[in-house]
């Protein structure tokens, strides 16, 4: 009789732990996704400032908008770091409960967000150079490079978001071990 009681307790507790572990993975996936949405919000604001550069008649005004765009990219970089970190945590926790497909998708999201962060770091550098440009040609060259890096970063963020959606779908069908 004691054996059956212990077996039932083990089964119930094991199920609770697995459910709690899956919930933790889900929380990390959702948190990473939320950070990635914040990244896109800051990036959109940066692009808005960059678009204002096109409609100004003075280099000094354009440099001011470049500075504002740079500040928004700086915020995006911070949120991107958080997205990377939470995707990494989701990967690790999915590994702990042997949800291999979830682990793989979370790893892919982490890689995409890390690549996006690199692109946004590049954009920041180009915007800083534009902000300090000595003439309009130098400004335009760095402006264009920054915009290209931002567009590449956006693509990486969106790809990482797809990976997180897949990770969540896989988690829901995972039979944690």
Image (cartoon, helix red, strand yellow):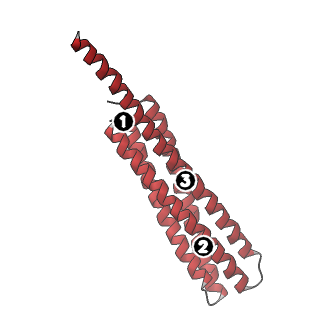
Helix, strand or loop at disc 1?
loop
Indicate which disc, 2 or 3, sits on the residue closer to the N terminus. 3
Mark 1: few/some/many CA within 10 Å (<14, 14-19, 20+): many
In this picture, residue 4 sits left or right of residue 104: left
- Whether label 1 touches label 3, CB < 8 Å: no
> Image height check: is 161 above or below 99?
below
Relative vertical location of residue 124 with respect to residue 135 in this rendering, above or below: above
Percent from the top left, x then y, of residue 26?
47, 39
Mark closest to the chain's N terminus, 1 or 3:
3
Q: Secondary structure at mark 3?
A: helix
- 120 or 41, nearer to the observer: 41
| Residue 2 in picture, x, y percent from top left | 22, 13
Which residue corresponds to mark 2?
A: 70
Q: Where does label 1 land, which residue?
A: 99
Q: Is residue 129 above or below residue 170?
A: below
Please report the residue visible at 55 percent of the width from the left and 67 percent of the height from the top.
149
Q: Residue at x 56, y 63 (%)?
A: 76
Q: Is residue 172 above or below residue 12?
A: below
Check disc 3 and report the residue beneath it. Answer: 36
Residue 144 place in picture, x, y as percent? 61, 73
| Side (left or right) of 91 relative to 72 | left
Distance between the Cα atoms at labels 1 and 3?
Answer: 23 Å
Q: Quadrant of residue 40?
A: bottom right
Q: CA distance from mark 2 to mark 1?
A: 39 Å
Extreme residue toward the top, this view = 1
Horizontal placement of 136 versus 80: left or right?
right
Q: Nearer the viewer, residue 80 or 130?
A: 80
In what element is the residue under mark 2?
A: helix
Specify the quadrant of the image occupied by residue 128: bottom right
**What is the crowding at mark 3: few (fewer than 14 residues within 10 Å), some, or many (at least 20)?**
many
Task: Answer whether labels 2 and 1 touch (C-beta < 8 Å).
Answer: no
């Amino acid at each position: 009789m004691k054996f059956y009681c212990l077996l039932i307790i083990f089964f119930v507790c094991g199920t609770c732990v697995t459910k709690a572990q899956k919930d933790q993975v889900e929380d990390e996936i959702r948190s990473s996704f939320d950070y990635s949405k914040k990244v896109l919000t800051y990036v959109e604001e940066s692009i808005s400032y960059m678009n204002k550069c096109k409609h100004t008649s003075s280099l000094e005004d354009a440099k001011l908008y470049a500075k504002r765009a740079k500040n928004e990219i700086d915020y995006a970089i911070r949120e991107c770091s958080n997205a990377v970190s939470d995707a990494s945590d989701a990967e690790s926790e999915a590994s702990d409960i042997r949800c291999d497909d979830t682990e793989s998708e979370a790893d892919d999201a982490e890689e995409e967000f890390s690549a996006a962060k690199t692109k946004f770091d590049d954009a920041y550098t180009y915007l800083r150079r534009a902000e300090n440009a000595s003439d309009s040609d130098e400004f335009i060259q760095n402006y264009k490079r920054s915009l290209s890096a931002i567009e590449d970063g956006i693509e990486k963020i969106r790809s990482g978001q797809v990976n997180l959606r897949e990770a969540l779908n896989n988690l829901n069908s995972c039979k944690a071990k």
